[in-house]
Image: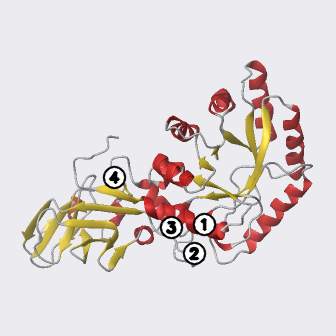
Amino acid sequence: MVTSYHRPTQLIIDSEAIRQNMHHLHTHRRPEEEVFAVVKANGYGHGAVPIAKIALEEGATGCCVATIDEAIELREAGIQAPVLILGIVDPQYLALISQYRFSIPLATSQWLREANKTYQQTPWENPIALHLAIDTGMGRIGFTNQAEVLQSYETIDELAGFFCEGIFTHFSTADEADQSYTNEQNQRFKAIIASLPKRPRYIHSANSASELWQESEGNLVRYGISLYGLNPSGNALDSPYPLIPALSLVSELVQVKQVPKGTKIGYGATYQTLDTEWIGTIPIGYADGFVRKLQGFHVLIDNHYCEIVGRVCMDQIMVRLPYELPVKEPVVLVGTMGEKSIELVDLATYIGTIHYEVACLFSERLPRIYKH
């Protein structure tokens, strides 16, 4: 998708907010904990490469991504810090993993056997760093059997093409007030670590939520959503330190018109004016990740909340204005105007999802402008 620089709709990323969020993390984490910045999904919509570079400048020692291609993007941008891929890697790509020196998860003993066969057929030069993935109750990826974990750990030591760099798990309810299930997961993880004859370099269970609200096992924090200034729980739990949102979404009015009572607006004629109204058009739509369900939500214009009327189009939305306003009048779709604000969590709540998803939906058509 082509980035549309020649229209007024932009994502503004506040680099200083990212720096401040890293600073607040450093004051809260344990001294022995390293930080890997999680920049998967294009940095949660904020831009993977710029965010990774800022986080590394501010004390992160590595990065986490979800896919091989996301990892390669970082290397091709000149980032040489450790990169941990969190998703399962097909053994056919292991030579590529070795070439770029990525770390990857090991989730089953079957995968290890297949990976070793691949190495025997075509050996690679750099041994591949494996992180044992432990499914303690998330149900996503990882070992569930303690004996299988121990066997795989011992097998890695016997293989020429691999070494065990880490062991990790992921909590499913760390962002909720009731921490009982998280505690159960943590106990399972501790038991598996205790069974190992030797602790690997990295032990990690702390994502943003568990870093904020509990004592997690290990020496590495996978710092994701909070890096971007977003509370992992939405509004359910208070953060122990300030989180500064880094993302704003802005645009301008491109047309303003007065229409009589009874005028139908948008596809399907789902809105009809109740009186003579001023209608403004803004160049953003669901192709930009501003989804159709946002009909009836609002934007900020001239310090007023202005309702989105009619269906969100692919490229444009219409809003009801309080009075006549000029073309090029600034619009805030996410962010602050005066004393009023619209947060990502507000959009998420309105459409029945989480702010993670809203941020990740913003497409490449939106230019990302980094404010320093």
Closer to the N terminus: mark 2 or mark 1?
Answer: 1
Tell me which residue sits at (72%, 24%) in the image.
125
Question: Picture coordinates of residue 114 (x, y %)?
Answer: 76, 30
For residue 359, which quarter of the picture?
bottom left
User: Element type at marker 3?
Assistant: loop
Question: Picture coordinates of residue 309 (x, y %)?
Answer: 23, 69
Q: Which residue is mark 3?
A: 230
| Left-right relation of 236 to 105 | left
Tell me which residue sits at (85%, 56%) in the image.
193
Mark 1 crowd level (few <14, some 14–19, many ≥20, 10 Å Cα): many
Q: Which quadrant of the figure contains the C terminus?
A: bottom left
User: Element type at marker 4?
Assistant: helix
| Left-right relation of 8 to 48 | left
Q: Amino acid at mark 2?
A: Tyr
- In front here: 196 or 220? 220
Residue contact between numbered discs 2 and 4, judged by CB atoms under 8 Å: no
Tell me which residue sits at (91%, 54%) in the image.
195
Q: Amino acid at mark 3?
A: Leu
**Alpha carbon distance from label 4 to label 1:** 31 Å
Q: Amino acid at mark 4?
A: Asp
- Residue 226 can be seen in this image: no
Query: In the displayed structure, would residue 86 be above or below residue 208?
Result: above
Mark 2 crowd level (few <14, some 14–19, many ≥20, 10 Å Cα): few
Closer to the N terminus: mark 2 or mark 3?
Answer: 3
| Res 120 label | none
Q: Which residue is mark 1?
A: 25
